[in-house]
Every structure is written in C-alpha cells, then in structure tokens.
Image (cartoon, helix red, strand yellow):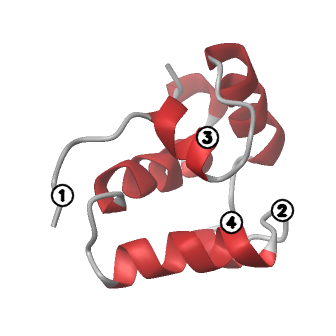
Amino acid sequence: MDMSAHRFTELFAQLGLPADEPAIRRFIATHSPLAAGIELADATFWTAGQASFLREEIVRDADWAEVVDQLNSALRAPPSQRG
C-alpha cells in the first residue's frame, strides 16, 4: 500500500474539484461549518462517486485517509479558526 502523504490539492484533484489554493479556500468557506451529526461523506454537496471515495478511504484507513481527515476537520472549524 502506498502510504505517501497527500496534500489538499491532490485530494481535490482526485475528487474532480478545482485544486488551486483559492478554489480550495472557497470550497471550505462555502461548505462549512459541517454539522456535527453529519459524516463527511454524507454531506449533500458530494456526488455519489466523491462520497464513495471519501467513505472508502476512511473505512480502509487507506493512503488518502489522513488528508480526508484534515478536510473533515477544516469543514468543521469555525471561520475564526481556519488558516
């Protein structure tokens, strides 16, 4: 298994989303804060394929899991705590 660390830009590209830093910041600002009771993959803004990818990577603790966890945290952080 490839355990190399992935970055947000790579994750967004993998999800088929714009992957430049301004686009990532806009995505996070637009879709957060994600409610505490909603799993990341169950958020309404994902396509079925994106949701499946996110869910599988976490369940399998695959090489993307760490950056998926980081995205989950970023989408739950209040605006004042985002980088």
Alpha carbon separation for disc pair 3 and 4: 25 Å
User: What residue did someone put label 4 on?
Assistant: 35
User: What residue did someone put label 3 on?
Assistant: 13
N-term-proximal mark, 3 vs 4: 3
Q: What residue type is labelled 3?
A: Ala
N-term-proximal mark, 1 vs 2: 1
Query: Circle 3: is it few (<14), some (14-19), or many (20+) Cα within 10 Å?
Result: few
Asked whether disc 2 touches disc 4, contact meaning CB atoms under 8 Å apart, the reply is no
N-term-proximal mark, 2 vs 4: 4
- Mark 3 lies on a secondary structure that is helix
Alpha carbon separation for disc pair 2 and 4: 13 Å
Alpha carbon separation for disc pair 1 and 3: 18 Å
Q: What residue type is labelled 4?
A: Ala
Alpha carbon separation for disc pair 2 and 3: 16 Å
N-term-proximal mark, 1 vs 4: 1
Asked whether disc 3 touches disc 4, contact meaning CB atoms under 8 Å apart, the reply is no
User: What residue did someone put label 1 on?
Assistant: 2
Alpha carbon separation for disc pair 1 and 4: 32 Å
Considering the image in quadrants, where does the N terminus appear? bottom left
User: What residue did someone put label 2 on?
Assistant: 45
Q: Which amino acid does label 1 sit on?
A: Asp
Above or below — where is 20 with respect to 33? above
Q: Nearer the viewer, mark 1 or mark 2?
A: 1
